[in-house]
């Protein structure tokens, strides 16, 4: 198996590719950042001076090299609209996104693991059918449709929760359900299928022959051994929470980095778009790598020579 150094090298290569792709996409998309700063009616001399100040008059390779030089120093540039450092804007919005992502991840764990265990334990019976129905519905409903539906039902019709924002008690409930439902559905199916795959393993038959109850066999022996693929999926889910939070934050006016990204796209604030996309990509890659390391702790066979 690959060493930790090799895996870290792979991570750096992926981050290099993602950052280069983001840089090129923002260079190639239509629109001129000078128009954002000065407006389309600015004088030609002012426009040329601003292009020089932003470094837009330099060759593409030179701009790419300067981009990486700044990135290594942790400098993501300044917002064209807000005139603040991009890193500072991300730091301001990040706590709200982390709060939402953490709540959604807890919802996934508290929902998916018990449902998956019950579905595998009661295979072919009504609890299994109920869990699979939940999983099918959760996978089928997109966030941009589920969010407004929950708002109409619980915020407007029943007046149980706030419509949007994060300043009132209960503001976290609907965004958490919206963001976590599909991920809980996927994880439920993974827990169930992983448990069913090892159901006929000899060590489980031995445990049953010793007189252990089916619940003890499932929780003490089957579930720990079935967690390896589940951990991998959870790592992907954790990384995807930040990307999935973009839609959820827009629907509920949640003041996180997802809303910051959408606002920056609408305002053509390219440095902010670049910074937020890079941060989300970095979080996704690091979450996947952390899941790999955690899986290696659970299964010595994939530790390799580390």
Image (tube, rainbow, N blue to C red):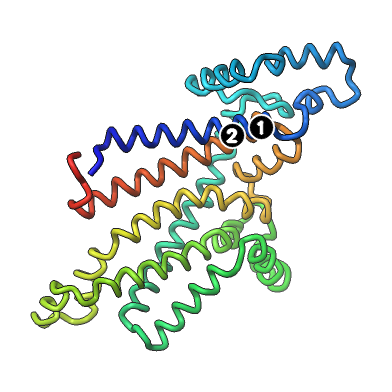
Does residue 213 appear left or right of residue 126 in this picture?
Answer: left
Q: Residues within 10 Å of mark 2 (few under 14, many from 20)?
A: some
Residues at discs 2 and 1 in contact (Cβ within 8 Å): yes
Q: Position of residue 29 (x, y in %)?
A: 71, 35
Label ID, residue 22: 2
The picture quadrant where one finds residue 108 is bottom left
Q: Position of residue 20 (x, y in %)?
A: 54, 30
Q: Quadrant of the C terminus?
A: top left
The percent coordinates of residue 97 (x first, y second) are 55, 46
Q: Is residue 142 left or right of residue 68?
A: right
Q: Residue at x 29, y 62 (%)?
A: 227
**Which mark, by number, is residue 242?**
none
Q: How many marks?
A: 2
Q: Which residue is mark 1?
A: 26
Q: Secondary structure at mark 1?
A: helix
Circle 1: is it few (<14), some (14-19), or many (20+) Cα within 10 Å?
Answer: some
Residue at the (47%, 52%) spot, across then down: 102
Q: Quadrant of the N terminus?
A: top left
Where is 15 relative to 200, above or below?
above
């Amino acid at each position: 198996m690959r060493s930790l150094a090799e895996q870290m090298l792979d991570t750096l290569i992926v981050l290099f590719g993602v950052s280069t792709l983001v840089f090129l996409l923002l260079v190639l998309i239509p629109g001129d950042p000078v128009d954002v700063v000065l407006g389309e009616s600015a004088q030609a001399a002012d426009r040329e001076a601003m292009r020089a100040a932003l470094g837009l008059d330099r060759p593409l390779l030179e701009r790419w090299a300067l981009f990486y030089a700044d990135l290594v120093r942790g400098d993501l540039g300044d917002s064209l609209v807000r005139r603040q450092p991009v890193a500072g804007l991300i730091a301001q919005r990040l706590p709200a996104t982390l709060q939402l992502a953490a709540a959604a991840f807890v919802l996934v764990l508290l929902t998916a693991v018990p449902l998956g265990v019950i579905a595998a334990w009661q295979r072919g019976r009504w609890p299994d059918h109920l869990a699979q129905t939940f999983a099918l519905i959760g996978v089928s409903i997109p966030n941009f449709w589920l969010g407004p539906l929950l708002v109409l039902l619980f915020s407007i019709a029943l007046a149980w929760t706030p419509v949007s924002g994060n300043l009132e008690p209960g503001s976290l409930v609907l965004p958490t359900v919206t963001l976590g439902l599909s991920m809980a559905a996927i994880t439920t199916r993974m827990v169930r299928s992983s448990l069913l795959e090892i159901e006929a393993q000899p060590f489980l038959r031995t445990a049953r022959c010793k007189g252990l109850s089916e619940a003890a066999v499932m929780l003490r022996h089957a579930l720990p051994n079935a967690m390896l693929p589940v951990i991998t999926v959870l790592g992907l889910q954790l990384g995807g929470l930040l990307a999935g939070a973009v839609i959820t934050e827009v629907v509920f006016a949640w003041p996180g980095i997802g809303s910051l990204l959408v606002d920056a796209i609408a305002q053509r604030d390219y440095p902010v778009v670049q910074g937020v996309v890079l941060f989300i990509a970095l979080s996704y890659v690091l979450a996947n790598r952390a899941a790999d390391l955690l899986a290696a702790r659970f299964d010595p066979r994939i530790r390799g020579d580390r």
